[in-house]
Image (cartoon, rainbow, N blue to C red):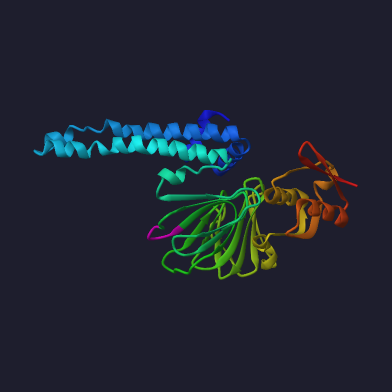
Amino acid sequence: MQEKDLIKYIKGETNPNESKSIIEWIRSDGKHQKRFNVLKAKYIASHLDSLNHIDTDLPYKRFSNKNKKKKIYYYPTAAILILLPLFAWYLFTYSENNTLVDTNNLFHFDTKNIVTKYGDQETIVLPDGSIAVLNSNSRLTYSKKFSDSTRTVTLVGEAFFDIKRDTTKPFIVKTEHLNVRVLGTSFNVKSYPNDENIETTLVTGKVEVLQKSYKSPILLTPSQRAIFDKRKNDIAIDNVDTQKAVAWRQGKLVFDKTPLKQVVLDLKRKYNVEFVIESDSLLNYKYTGEFDNLSLEEVLKLFKLSSSINYKYKNNKIMLNSE
């Protein structure tokens, strides 16, 4: 990974795909984690060091009580000398445990970035008391204090939202290709960079799906799902079983005539293992089945029993082919 790309991520200037790629690179190796942490520490130190250039003679010139005022303006520099060793200790302590240190949270006090690993979930209480449940390999970004006019969050991945009603302040979920706008409701948004579709499923209330290609928002009613096809730049609406759509919150994976390419992406996020579809005939195969808190080995055995799919392990990957 090039240093300029890491600096771009540290500065918060990467797009969702770039961020995902960098996070996966950091987590893939402890050496990558340490390299990132050192680079982040140097970057922050260089910015903190700019405080040293404050004109400490300025208060001396302006006020008669010269010595007292000068001492006040030495405090930022002293604070840097104290904080930097602690900051470095924090980075290296956590990197030893191969944990991704989200240093944006340490110095960007107005924004929170919550990132989940493969197989993990996290429940988040948002500033207005609304609840978000973040699925694995996802990121939710939001302000620690919402503005006076909107409540906006940015999602990469999947999350279930239970939003407190506020008719004066709409809640907006921003994704890579579309936005979801609500006043108070519960719904699910699935927007992973590698997926072909973005899905919004309404459980209760009403939501508006906004996409720049459409002049008017699309209004969903309960049990409806909006599917945005990234390749076709088009939205389709269908009716779904909402309990199945949000079953991932209970550790379940439910597939209903789901393309195998999508199935293996969901399995990768849950079990942190790479799948390779070897048979061309499986590229268009659609799978129906339910995995209720099963181990990876149990999932693979069920695959084999319930379909014509066979599997084998090769180079820490699971190779799928047709029998």
Percent position (x, y) of residue 282?
83, 47
Q: Nearer the viewer, residue 305 or 238?
A: 305
Position of residue 78 relative to residue 173, above or below, is: above
Q: Quadrant of the N terminus?
A: top right
Mark yes or no: residue 317 visible.
yes
Please give left or right for residue 258 compared with residue 193 in the image: right
Percent position (x, y) of residue 304?
86, 52
Q: Nearer the viewer, residue 167 or 74?
A: 74
Percent position (x, y) of residue 154?
51, 52
Percent position (x, y) of residue 140?
53, 52
Q: Image quarter for residue 149?
A: bottom left
Q: Nearer the viewer, residue 37 or 241?
A: 37
Magenta stretch holds residue 149: yes
Which SS does the magenta portion mostly show? Answer: loop
Please give left or right for residue 275 compared with residue 11 in the image: right
Magenta stretch holds residue 85: no
Residue span colored magenta? 147-151
Q: Image quarter for residue 161?
A: bottom right
Residue at position x 40%, y 48% in the image:
109
Residue at the extreme right of the image, as rendered: 323
Residue at position x 68%, y 63% in the image:
247
Position of residue 201 relative to residue 23, above or below, is: below
